[in-house]
Image: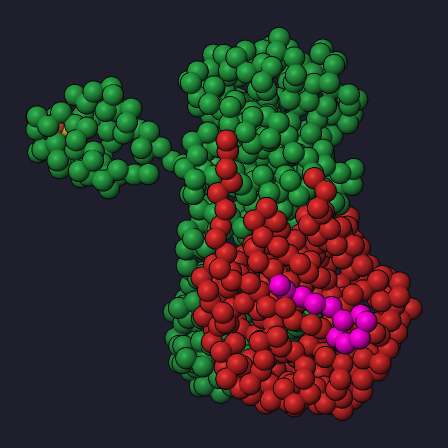
Chain colours: A green, B red
């Protein structure tokens, strides 16, 4: 893994010339070790030294980019086996299969689905990002698919067994940085050259893990660096286990030949979209870089996008929401005002239910240091005086004409205190459980 | 030659028997992470429990009621249908009706429902209380009494009421569900307390607190992974108990499970979507390490059971 400052020092010229802006080579080495400097700042390091350094500092799983601009995705680059050990970094990309056997209407509708299946979710947009274009013998149609794809912004996976056709396709969409699928023992040289010539990522399809390793070794030797792995297994159990074995080999076994993200094909593992979705969910949890699906339907892609969001949420992120006023469903000066704590889960559930009710409302989130309403109340952080002074200061008064405030059901016992703190206000006790908020708001006066 | 780098497991999850007689079910017993069968064993595959309520639910989606429309007003008939028509291996009786924040049904009324359900089915039953410490302390003790001899899993037991319910469970020889709020250390602590009280190892199950998809699923996911890691690789014997996730209620109450396709066309068919929301969540819990997941819709249950079968199938 990473080298120590002393180990790096040994690779430097030791002339202390100062051109790196550090007084000595040793100081520069220390800065490198703690990632405060870049190796390129020293013009005198030997090629040999530079190579050793970059190899030692290379991440155990290479990060690979596919696509361009807004739809560029990064996969791989992961450093842990379990999300609680740090965090997972790069969400797997979801690709919809589009084949040269489909008719025009079907093709058009599939491109459209990538655009259609986008979901706003408090602060982010959930969306799939790739199209997987598959050649099965109708060359002209395949090329027209590629041409259509570059009119859209999505990332592209090119699935094509014929080298000359693949070359044509890559030429058309090279600016999009498509993933070329796939190098096998039969065509590894040719596809390696192709990927290198166009500077595109290349998928490797071997029959099992060992063959995959042979292929990546050959390609690495050719200088092709951005690889994506497929072990060819299409059974649920084997494919799932392969993901685990590969991730572990790269991170624990320091296996360079397997230090790449993977591509998986739930679309080839069942005929039922329902089951395919569950197979895909296994790969979201355990380690796929790309997941190719036979179709995107709202009912199938949405649960996967939510799962991906959850699994890839950084567990180190504080579980709090920023204190403030959150307008939901376009409220105006007559809309109800609710107050809650800043535990992010509470905020999430409460705001979701308010949205659900479709009643325009103001949600005031008070800083309770991430405690839930009940714990905050028990800890003395959700009491009459704190609620009262927050309401006076947060700016909600300027936004409304009425003087009514809904407090959480779990804080019902502070009703009297809040009334004292906010003279002239009508303090109302809302439901205890967020599920009952829509019904409550619909009746609200 | 490529060699798989294997995890050195030092522990084993305890086996807990639910129910009695021919249809009793053993859960737990695994010696590896979930479905990591290249380096360990899962002698008892994970199980799905069918959720049944103690009263006719008034806020369920029509497509959730549909499979049970003929029996939904009668918990015993409902449970029987789960077993006879949908081949349920375990029933999870959710005593929602007793919740003081809801219908607040009186204890004896609910206890008689429990009795009817227990008598109606021969498969194991999990009885899930209200999560209200005081109410459960009274209610679940009575449940333990009337279920004598049936080896019914009773919970949730919290730090506040574990003594009352635990003692009665010991007396009537039932397994208990130790419930802690998404925290490995609190889970361990409660298991220790239960042990001190005299609850035997083969009578303890962990309820890690289950978050729904999009609503905190990740917290449960990681806590389950950490529980299993501690139990299997760090010799933490107080975390070597099977894990039960009460999932159904967390999924079906969310707004994404309630909106119809007409409300939001982008979300697609509401029935299929909710089935997938439930089954994708269940898969996540199983991959994290759950031994039992409580689910609602027969179609999501069938899907997940098929996945469990494939993930544990021997033939390669
Ligand atoms: S530029 Fe290179 S040789 Fe000069 S001091 Fe810095 S590390 Fe040493």
- The span picked out in magenta is B19-29
> Residue placed at 51% from the left, 23% from the top?
A214
> Residue placed at 81% from the left, 79% from the top?
B118
**Place of residue A76 in the rendered image (x, y in percent of width and height, measured from the top left):** 48, 36
Q: Quadrant of ligand 1?
A: top left
Which quarter of the rendered picture does the C terminus of chain B lie within?
Answer: top right
Does residue A74 appear anywhere in the picture? no
Q: Is residue B164 left or right of residue B306?
A: left
Residue farthest to the top, as pictured: A164
> Residue placed at 43% from the left, 40% from the top?
A253
B44 above or below B76?
Answer: above
A158 above or below A360?
Answer: above
Q: Is residue B273 left or right of residue A22?
A: right
Magenta span contains residue B27: yes
Q: Closer to the camera, A435 or A366?
A: A435
A79 above or below B41?
Answer: above
Residue farthest to the front, as pictured: B1
Q: Closer to the camera, B231 or A85?
A: B231
**Place of residue B308 in the rendered image (x, y in percent of width and height, measured from the top left):** 70, 52
Task: Give the quarter of the image for residue B284.
Answer: bottom right
B216 above or below A72?
Answer: below
Q: Closer to the camera, A300 or A215?
A: A215
Count of numbered circles on the image:
0
**Place of residue B169 in the rendered image (x, y in percent of width and height, measured from the top left):** 65, 85
Q: Is residue B5 left or right of residue B15?
A: left
Magenta span contains residue A189: no
Does residue A242 appear anywhere in the picture? yes
């Amino acid at each position: 893994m990473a080298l120590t400052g002393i180990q790096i020092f040994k690779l430097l010229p030791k002339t202390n010339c100062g051109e790196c802006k550090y007084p000595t080579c040793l100081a520069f080495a220390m800065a490198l070790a703690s990632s405060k400097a870049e190796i390129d700042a020293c013009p005198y390091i030997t090629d040999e030294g530079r190579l050793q350094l970059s190899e030692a500092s290379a991440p155990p799983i290479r990060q690979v980019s596919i696509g361009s601009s807004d739809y560029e995705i990064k996969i791989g680059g992961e450093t842990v086996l379990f999300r609680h050990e740090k965090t997972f970094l790069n969400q797997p990309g979801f690709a919809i299969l589009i084949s040269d056997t489909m008719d025009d209407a079907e093709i058009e509708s599939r491109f459209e689905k990538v655009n259609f299946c986008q979901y706003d979710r408090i602060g982010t947009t959930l969306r799939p990002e790739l199209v997987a274009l598959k050649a099965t013998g109708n060359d002209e149609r395949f090329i027209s698919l590629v041409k259509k794809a570059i009119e859209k912004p999505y990332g592209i996976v090119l699935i094509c067994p014929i080298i000359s056709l693949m070359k044509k396709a890559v030429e058309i969409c090279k600016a999009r940085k498509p993933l070329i699928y796939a190098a096998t023992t039969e065509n590894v040289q040719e596809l390696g050259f192709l990927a290198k010539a166009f500077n595109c990522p290349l998928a490797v399809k071997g029959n099992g893990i060992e063959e995959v390793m042979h292929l990546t070794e050959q390609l690495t030797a050719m200088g092709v660096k951005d690889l994506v792995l497929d072990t060819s297994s299409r059974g649920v159990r084997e494919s799932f286990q392969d993901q685990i074995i590969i991730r572990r080999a790269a991170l624990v076994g320091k296996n360079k030949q397997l230090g790449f993200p993977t591509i998986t094909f739930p679309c080839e593992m069942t005929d039922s979209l329902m089951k395919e979705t569950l197979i895909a969910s296994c790969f979201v949890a355990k380690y796929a870089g790309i997941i190719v699906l036979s179709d995107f339907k709202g009912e199938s892609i949405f649960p996967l996008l939510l799962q991906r969001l959850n699994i890839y949420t950084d567990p180190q992120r504080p579980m709090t929401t920023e204190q403030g006023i959150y307008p939901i469903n376009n409220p105006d000066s007559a809309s109800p005002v609710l107050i809650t704590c800043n535990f992010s889960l509470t905020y999430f559930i409460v705001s979701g239910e308010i949205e659900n009710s479709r009643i325009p409302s103001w949600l005031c989130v008070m800083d309770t240091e991430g405690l839930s309403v009940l714990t905050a109340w028990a800890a003395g952080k959700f009491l009459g005086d704190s609620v009262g002074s927050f309401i006076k200061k947060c700016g909600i008064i300027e936004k409304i004409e009425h003087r009514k405030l809904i407090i959480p059901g779990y804080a019902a016992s502070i009703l009297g205190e809040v009334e004292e703190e906010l003279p002239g206000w009508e303090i109302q006790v809302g439901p205890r459980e967020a599920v009952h908020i829509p019904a409550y708001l619909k009746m609200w006066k | 030659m490529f060699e798989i780098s294997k995890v050195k497991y030092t522990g084993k999850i305890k086996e807990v028997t639910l129910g009695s007689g021919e249809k009793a079910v053993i859960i737990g017993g695994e010696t590896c992470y979930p479905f990591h069968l290249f380096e360990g064993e899962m002698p008892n595959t994970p199980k799905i429990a069918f959720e049944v309520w103690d009263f006719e639910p008034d806020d369920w989606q029509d497509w959730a009621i549909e499979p049970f429309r003929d029996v939904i007003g009668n918990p015993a008939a409902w449970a029987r249908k789960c077993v006879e028509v949908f081949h349920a291996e375990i029933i999870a009786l959710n005593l929602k009706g007793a919740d003081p924040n809801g219908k607040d049904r009186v204890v004896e009324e609910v206890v008689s429902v429990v009795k009817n359900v227990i008598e109606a089915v021969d498969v194991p039953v999990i009885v899930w209380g209200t999560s209200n410490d005081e109410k459960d302390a009274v209610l679940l003790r009575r449940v333990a009494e009337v279920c004598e001899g049936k080896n019914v899993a009773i919970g949730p037991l919290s730090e506040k009421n574990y003594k009352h319910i635990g003692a009665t469970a010991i007396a009537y020889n039932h397994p208990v569900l130790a419930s802690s709020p998404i925290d490995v250390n609190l889970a361990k602590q409660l298991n220790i307390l239960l042990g001190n009280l005299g609850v035997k190892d083969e009578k303890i199950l962990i309820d890690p607190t289950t978050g729904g998809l999009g609503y905190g699923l990740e917290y449960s996911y990681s806590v389950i992974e950490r529980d299993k890691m501690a139990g299997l690789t760090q010799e933490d014997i107080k975390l070597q108990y099977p894990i039960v996730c009460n999932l159904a209620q967390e999924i079906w109450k969310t707004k994404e499970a309630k909106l119809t396709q007409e409300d939001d066309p982008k979300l697609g068919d509401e029935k299929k979507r909710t089935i997938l929301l439930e089954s994708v969540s269940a898969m996540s819990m199983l991959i994290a390490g759950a031994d039992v997941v409580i689910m609602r819709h027969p179609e999501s249950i069938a899907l997940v059971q098929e996945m469990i079968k494939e993930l544990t199938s021997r033939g390669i």
